[in-house]
């Protein structure tokens, strides 16, 4: 039975699987499976996805063993598996797995825009962490690609639902694609194959194009365009045809960690730890700096202070609203007045990130403001398509200040919605008070 039969010949939306899971919406699929939106029977407000595959598919045993292995493993960057089983719809015998619902995955973002370097730097550590965890348990992911890099409640996770044991042949040998390492042609699965897949995924995420490669040759793939460092070097190391020469997860992580100029290094000739500055020299420098600091403080204490107004300097990203005399008068008289914005803080977007924006990236933040005008809680009302821009908006929103609403002469809590619109030419922010 093909997935075309599942999607077209039968309208399965509305069907109930195993008496518990209603197929609410078809989300997508592949040649061997289909994915539907469902909800957890014990908590119908909790969304989940249910994956259906024909029970007689060539790789059915791989799915069954993979699901069994997944239920025994728990990691914060692996998609959680809730339930598995067998079912029948009409004459079709199926296997099913119910998993965490992801708001988006990388394959949905890349066609619209490439990731920024900052976003790529945020993406890699969770993926490396999850892959290292699997490798440490004796497993290989085996099919890492953008559609398996997902976001669940603003946390990056990878989907893993087919077990591949390190060093063992694959249970099925479908046609190899770009994400599949060259050595998989022999059927043997090793952790090096995941490194290759990671390299292809990284290149595609940053350039919207796959590496340029002819599988029939013995040449390493070429990058499809300029890629900033350290990602270009990471990609080249991941995409070496020879798995022995290929980079590792540890080497990728090392490229992401900036090395301090004072950090001890390893001597290539002796293998011993050396320091770029002798310890005595470091102590001497510290003492000199301390003496200079003490002298400056004493000099400052003996100088007359400048006028108070010259000591107050607002950051360039902060805009303050001057106090209103009429408002103060209203408060003293015991009147009522709506809240107002006292201080705005705009997100600081790098020029490289701005260049990736197509149209507008919209993010809505809901703020809970105390009677003192300070933000007590900030949460996403709508996080938009990009975790990078969403986090920028959230960080800025937390720093806003407000003049609280006044009831009977007293300041009271309020709730505000800030809508950030990121564009190539700047960021616009619209505040709306939604409750007194």
Image (cartoon, rainbow, N blue to C red):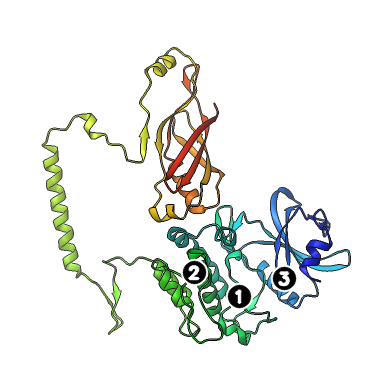
**Image quadrant where one finds the N terminus:** bottom right
Nearer to me, 256 or 112: 112
Q: CA distance from mark 2 to mark 1?
A: 18 Å
Looking at the image, which residue is at 47% across and 46% down? 422
Can the viewer see residue 255?
yes
- Image marks 3 and 2: residues in contact by CB distance under 8 Å: no
N-term mark: 3 or 1: 3
The residue pinned by badge 2 equals 203
Residue drawn 55% across the image and 73% down it: 197
The secondary element bearing badge 3 is classed as loop
Q: Quadrant of the C terminus?
A: top right
Q: Position of residue 160 (x, y in %)?
A: 63, 68
- Residue 276: image quadrant is bottom left
Q: Quadrant of residue 271?
A: bottom left
What is the distance, in whole Å, between disc 3 and disc 2 at their CAs? Answer: 25 Å
Q: Is residue 141 above or below residue 382?
A: below
Measuring from the top left, give residue 205's x and y in whole percent. 51, 64
Using the rendered image of the protein, determine whether residue 188 is visible from the camera's viewpoint.
Answer: no
Give the side of residue 273 with respect to residue 230, left or right.
Answer: left
Q: Is residue 193 above or below residue 6?
A: below
- Please state if 254 lies on the left or on the right of 103 as rendered: left
Which residue is disc 1 drawn over?
A: 142
Q: What crowding class fits label 2: few (fewer than 14 Cα within 10 Å), some (14-19), or many (20 or more)?
A: many
Whether tag 2 and tag 1 are in contact, CB under 8 A, the answer is: no
SS label for mark 1 = loop
Estimate the x, y position of residue 258 in percent, counting from the top left. Answer: 35, 65
Question: Which of pointers 2 and 1 indicates the residue nearer the eye?
Answer: 2
Residue wearing tag 3? 31
The x, y position of residue 25, in whole percent, is 74, 54
């Amino acid at each position: 039975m093909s997935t075309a039969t599942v999607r077209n010949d039968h309208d399965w939306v509305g069907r109930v699987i195993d008496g518990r899971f209603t197929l609410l919406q078809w989300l997508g699929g592949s040649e061997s499976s289909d994915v539907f939106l469902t909800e957890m029977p014990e908590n119908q407000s909790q969304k989940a996805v249910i994956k259906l595959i024909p029970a007689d598919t060539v790789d059915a045993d791989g799915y069954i063993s993979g699901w069994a292995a997944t239920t025994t493993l728990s990691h914060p960057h692996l998609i959680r598996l809730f339930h598995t089983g067998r079912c029948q719809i009409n004459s079709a015998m199926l296997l099913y797995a119910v998993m965490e619902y992801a708001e988006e995955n990388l394959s949905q973002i890349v066609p619209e825009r490439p990731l920024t370097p900052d976003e790529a730097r945020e993406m890699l550590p969770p993926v490396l962490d999850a892959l290292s965890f699997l490798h440490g348990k004796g497993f290989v992911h085996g099919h890492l690609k953008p559609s398996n890099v997902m976001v669940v409640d603003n946390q990056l996770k990878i989907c893993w639902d087919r077990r591949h044991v390190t060093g063992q042949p694959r249970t099925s040998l479908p046609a190899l694609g770009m994400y599949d390492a060259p050595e998989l042609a022999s059927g043997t699965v090793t952790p090096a194959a995941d490194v290759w897949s990671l390299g292809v995924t990284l290149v595609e995420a940053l350039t919207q194009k796959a590496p340029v490669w002819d599988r029939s040759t013995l040449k390493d793939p070429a990058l499809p365009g300029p890629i900033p460092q350290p990602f270009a070097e990471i990609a080249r190391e991941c995409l070496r045809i020879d798995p022995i020469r290929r980079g590792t997860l540890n080497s990728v992580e090392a490229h992401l960690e900036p090395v301090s100029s004072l950090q001890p290094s390893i001597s290539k000739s002796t293998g011993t730890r050396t320091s770029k500055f002798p310890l005595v020299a470091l102590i001497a420098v510290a003492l000199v700096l301390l003496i200079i600091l003490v002298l400056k403080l004493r000099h400052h204490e003996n100088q007359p202070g400048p006028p108070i107004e010259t000591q107050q300097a607002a950051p360039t990203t902060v805009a303050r609203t001057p106090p209103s005399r009429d408002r103060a008068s209203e408060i003293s008289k015991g009147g009522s007045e709506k809240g107002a914005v006292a201080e705005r803080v705009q997100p600081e977007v790098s020029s490289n990130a701005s260049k990736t924006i197509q149209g507008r990236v919209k993010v809505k933040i809901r703020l809970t403001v105390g009677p003192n005008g300070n933000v007590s809680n900030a949460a996403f009302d709508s996080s938009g398509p990009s975790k990078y821009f969403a986090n920028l908006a959230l960080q800025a929103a937390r720093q806003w200040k407000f003049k609280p609403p006044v009831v009977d002469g007293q300041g009271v809590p309020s709730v505000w919605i800030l809508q950030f619109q990121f564009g190539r030419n700047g960021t616009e922010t619209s505040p709306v008070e939604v409750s007194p």
